[in-house]
């Protein structure tokens, strides 16, 4: 026997209410605000509203669910099951009606706001809430006695059936409306873009009748050297394809300042670079679509993160002001644009673009994206986040306050300006161990998995096919040399007279360390030279000085946690980074990698509108520290030249590593002197 | 002696209030909501805020104004007077401060919302309230310690100094911001477009420092045959140049339906016609700018009125649905677009376009513009408005209710399909008189002002240089023939045996009337043939039947007032129109011409935002009658074939004209029979 107003309980939300007999499950879910998807608006077509009713005794909910608590499977459900298959126990929420007290589970794939759990365990889940979604609409037919345009009737239907008011349409989309409405017999599936800006919803694309296609977005990390992009499914957040290409602007200058200089020397150079990067973006979009086997027209959105110079050049704005104090951005806010405004033609012609806000003239949307991904502004403990690239973006903070700066580390960490350096590609030495006794090296080489033991490390002599050393490899090599006593705290090779190895070779007035000799097989001889060590010292000093400047501003001497972000950060060994003094001292188990956090931030902003609002608000609260004009930056830079540091203590490091030159890193007298010096600064 | 809070009275508004000593007049005006202009925001640069203080005893206002009621002329005013001249007694409202009770007159040219009184006495004044205006803004300089973009500081300044919030900028305009701000030393004059749609204000253009230039708009009447445009000053509404060109789509079809047919026969034909009209619009804009001697970049807006087929082809929408019932428009609402979306490149690149709403599939934005110009919805009496072109747009109504329809009159009224017809151009006979006794004609010819008497009419024999007869000429010729007894009520020439003139010539089985014989000088012989009369009968029947259908819907047998709109309407003689039965009977002095009312409506919408809101609301209330599927239209059409009409009475016409066939037009038996027939219908 059923109550006249049966009790309906939805899980996992626990939302409950009483509904009249015969109420469709989808209707009940909507009235209770239960997160149950539907594209077709309850017409039994899209199957997005699948639910799993539970039968039996649910004493914890205080109900008993009879076998006939829902209406019997109807013809629409039978047809759907026959044609496309329905999992056992599943019902279409728009067809099944309530006939008695019932407990109904909404499976994850039927939720609009699906959570996408990222593979990297440290990072947060993305809740799907994209700007663009599909809706099936039934439009009234025209009546010459009540004249109104087809578009106005679509607006009306969308308002009545989906609560979406004030639809607008670009002319090229509008021009396709009439034949499509008629072909679909006045049913049409529309892709509607409605973002967080308060702008009117827009019609992006449309298909006759019910269209069961996916929509995609591009999350693009536009770096000075590399443009990396993920093609994401806008319904489930799945990354369908990823690719990275060189930024073609490299031919105008390796780093940011050389590109700004190019513009200053070559009037119109900004337009050349804008055209080059836009063309590359089109190529990238086309190749991602091809790789995923999708129609490029289904790419309806893109999100961008980039540093300020890349940002301006993407937008077609001369970046010259970013090359000189006061480093004024033309615009700092987030931007919502038509893809066409950026000449992005390899996507849907009405696609929209979201560009994250910049924090300051030297701290761009890429830093904002790192903040969005790593959320220092929600952190209970004090976290230092460094995103290492040609420029390092540095964030320090917790839920009380977040500081940011950028620091010009140069390209050494990426293997450039290193004698045997190369990009992280097959053949590159990526990890190094040096035996403190024998001074013999072992290493791992990218793309080579035949090793002598389970550690993944092989003796230099057992290795072939080595072509060079990449950023993480040179960092480990220098750090291992430091630990093995081959390099002293000042960075000098062989100063302590550690010549008890044939691998130490004279090179002019200095020495170098032979890491690998492939010359017998016609391969390279890979050495770590004094010049290599100096290049690493310059880069790491800049990074450390930036972090230290933020710590000064925050009034702290240590941080609780360090996050290494960026593709490079993912491959750095925390211990080696700390031996070099790239980052301040911290418990080694509190130093972690976040992978490509900027790219993750771009994905989050692509998939979740609330995240856009959040980062726009957060950016306004992040306090920017300008390294370029801060006198203490130079002071910190010089002090940070030593390995790990001339004055700052590294007590946490000292717990796990005993460096041959202990007075610099155990918090002893040198450290006390360092603190005194800072107080005078 | 002055009060500490002197009384300030502004005229002509009469607004008054008390202000602290030293308050600038402009500040007082703003606080009271007095309509006092300013572009520079009170910096003594633009001189738009000039006022005329009055001194002496103003007993009607209850104040006495002392000679020192305003501060003495200051250096800024002296400099302005020296450089650019200030009229005697004038003060700059932003410089003069209040020192005592004072009466201040705001002259018309200092009002923001200037009234532009049109030359045509019957029409309403336009109050200037355009979407785009200039503002001088002082922007904060960048500060690297409080980083924000230059654009964000412009937004902030515009909000603080002008109350304009949420400015947006197209990328190409944004890209010009940084050098212009620096060139103007952080002062910039911006052209801001902020319309009635609720969309965010947009930056259209900008200039370093104070820019004292004019902004212009185009009011465009895009007709099937002719594209007419006015170039209007957006500050004072002045028409700086006007031009009309042929619509190049004519090569695809003379009338609307033939263009729709062209699209049906030629896939892609709509795109050809869209490209053709957009190119013509660019040519027209460029030639208007050249004629007025202005930079085309200062054209920042355009308003469009057009029939539905022209509307769709302008927008790039296939008009095929407009050629078949139910005549569904792709979109009926007004549109606010970027000029670039219509490929209008001969104006400012960021210019905006406003397109008036359409009323229905056969009643377009041109009819809406006529309504805006003639305001039937405010009329106390019942007014019939006919806008005669290749299609006639007909409106009937008063402040209670307005009806609209269109009627396919064809091109006969424009001189096409007439044996000696031509466009209204030099050489065309435009007015005709026929002596009822001698049957001899006299006429006026366009471009020929040597006449035998003050009437402006010349005997046919005294005229040279005649090339043909235009629409108004053929209407008068047929009407005069009807009055002279040369044509009977059925439209037959010579049926009553009136052959007492050598001008009546046999032509096959019918006769024709020789209007002009220039053959002796190698000129044309111009006759009115039976075919010409049949063509006019068809056209006028369609017009009358449309009007009559609206009268049926309204439940009336007569109207209080008739307005003839359109370029053609301006040249029609009301008496002759009524003799032909083009329009229903009405007192002749209540039949008037409104000139190009559609074009006027376009100008009003260009210059006044409230008018846009008004017409959008009015269009929703206008009741549309579809002539194409209304059986009574055919019935009315057949009855209207007679001259003036087979059944309807013309008592007002009978007061001034005695037609040889009186039973048809005096309200006698025939009229009674007509009313009975309608009752059965």
Image (cartoon, coloured by chain):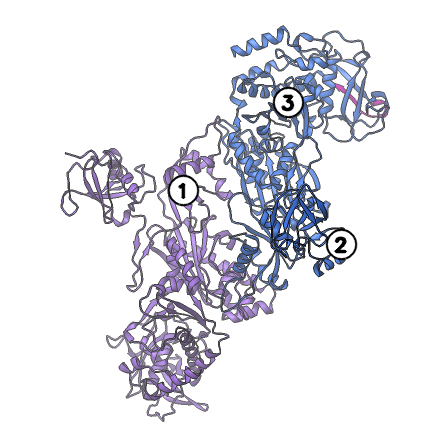
Chain colours: A blue, B purple
Give the left or right position of residue A390, taking residue A88 as reference. left
Residue A342 visible within the image:
yes
Residue A462 % position (x, y): 86, 23
Q: Nearer the viewer, residue A80 or B414?
A: A80
Q: Residues within 10 Å of mark 2 (few under 14, many from 20)?
A: few
The relative height of residue B306 versus residue B184 in the rendered view (above or below) is below
Residue A523 lies in the magenta-colored region = yes
Q: Residues within 10 Å of mark 1 (few under 14, many from 20)?
A: some
Q: Residues within 10 Å of mark 3 (few under 14, many from 20)?
A: many
> Which residue bears the numbered disc 2?
A85
Q: Which residues are magenta?
A: A518-528
The residue positioned 34% from the left and 40% from the top of the image is B40
The relative height of residue A460 versus residue B375 in the rendered view (above or below) is above
Write down the chain letter for disc 3: A
> Which residue bears the numbered disc 3?
A561
Write down the chain letter for disc 2: A
Q: Nearer the viewer, mark 2 or mark 1?
A: 2
Disc marking residue B164: 1
Give the left or right position of residue A436, taking residue A223 as reference. right
């Amino acid at each position: 026997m059923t109550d006249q107003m049966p009790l309906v309980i939805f899980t996992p939300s626990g939302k409950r209410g009483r509904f009249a007999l015969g109420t469709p499950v989808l209707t009940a879910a909507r009235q209770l605000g239960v997160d149950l998807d539907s594209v077709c608006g309850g017409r039994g077509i899209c199957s997005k509203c699948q639910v799993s009713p539970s039968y039996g005794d649910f004493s914890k909910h205080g109900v008993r669910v009879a076998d006939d608590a829902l209406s019997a499977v109807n013809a629409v459900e039978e047809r759907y099951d026959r044609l496309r298959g329905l999992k056992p126990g599943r019902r279409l929420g728009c067809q099944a009606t309530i006939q008695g007290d019932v407990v109904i589970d909404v499976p994850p794939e039927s939720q609009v706001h699906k959570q996408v759990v990222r593979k990297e365990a440290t990072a947060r889940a993305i809740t799907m809430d994209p700007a663009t979604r599909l809706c099936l609409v039934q439009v009234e037919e025209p009546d010459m006695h009540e004249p109104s345009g087809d578009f106005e009737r679509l607006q009306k239907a969308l308002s009545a059936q989906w609560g979406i008011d004030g639809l607008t349409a670009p002319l090229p989309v509008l021009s396709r409306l009439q034949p499509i409405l008629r072909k679909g017999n006045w049913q049409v599936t529309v892709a509607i873009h409605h973002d967080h800006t308060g702008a009117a919803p827009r019609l992006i694309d449309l298909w006759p009748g019910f269209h069961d296609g996916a929509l995609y977005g591009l999350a693009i990390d536009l770096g000075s050297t590399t443009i990396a992009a993920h093609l994401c499914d806008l319904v489930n957040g799945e990354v369908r394809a990823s690719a990275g290409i060189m930024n073609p602007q490299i031919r105008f200058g390796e780093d940011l300042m050389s590109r700004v200089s190019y513009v200053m020397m070559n009037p119109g150079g900004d337009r050349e670079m804008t055209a080059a990067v836009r063309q590359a973006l089109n190529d990238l979009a086309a190749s991602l679509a091809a790789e995923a086997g999708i129609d490029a027209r289904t790419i309806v959105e893109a999100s961008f993160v980039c540093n300020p110079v890349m940002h301006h050049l993407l937008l077609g704005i001369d970046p010259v002001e970013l090359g000189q104090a006061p480093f004024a951005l033309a615009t700092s806010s987030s931007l919502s644009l038509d893809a066409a405004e950026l000449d992005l033609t390899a996507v849907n012609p009405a696609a929209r673009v979201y560009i994250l806000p910049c924090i300051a003239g030297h701290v761009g949307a890429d830093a904002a994206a790192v903040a969005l991904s790593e959320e220092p502004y929600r952190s209970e403990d004090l976290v230092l986040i460094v995103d290492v690239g040609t420029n390092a973006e540095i964030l320090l903070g917790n839920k009380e306050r977040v500081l940011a700066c950028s620091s010009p580390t140069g390209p050494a960490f990426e293997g450039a300006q290193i004698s045997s350096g190369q990009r992280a590609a097959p053949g590159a030495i990526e990890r190094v161990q040096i035996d403190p006794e024998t001074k013999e090296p072992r290493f791992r080489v990218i793309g080579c998995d035949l090793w002598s033991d389970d550690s993944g490390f092989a003796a230099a002599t057992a290795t072939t096919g080595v072509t060079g050393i990449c950023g993480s490899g040179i960092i480990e090599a220098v750090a291992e040399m430091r630990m093995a006593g081959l390099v002293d705290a000042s960075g000098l090779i062989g100063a302590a007279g550690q010549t008890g190895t044939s691998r130490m070779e004279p090179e002019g007035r200095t020495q170098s360390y032979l890491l690998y000799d492939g010359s017998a097989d016609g391969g390279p001889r890979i050495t770590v030279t004094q010049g290599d060590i100096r290049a690493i010292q310059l880069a790491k000093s800049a990074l450390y000085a930036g972090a230290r400047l933020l710590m000064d501003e925050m009034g702290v001497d240590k941080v609780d946690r360090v996050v290494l972000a960026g593709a490079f950060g993912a491959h750095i060994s925390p211990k080696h980074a700390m031996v070099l003094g790239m980052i301040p001292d911290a418990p080694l188990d509190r130093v972690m990698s976040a992978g490509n956090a900027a790219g993750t931030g771009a994905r989050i902003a692509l998939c979740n509108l609330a995240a856009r609002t959040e980062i726009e608000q957060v950016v306004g609260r992040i306090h920017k520290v300008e390294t370029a004009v801060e006198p203490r930056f130079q002071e910190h830079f010089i002090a940070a030249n030593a390995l790990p540091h001339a004055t700052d203590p590294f007590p946490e490091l000292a717990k796990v590593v005993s460096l041959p030159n202990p007075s610099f890193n155990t918090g002893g007298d040198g450290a006390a002197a360092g603190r005194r010096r800072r107080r005078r600064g």
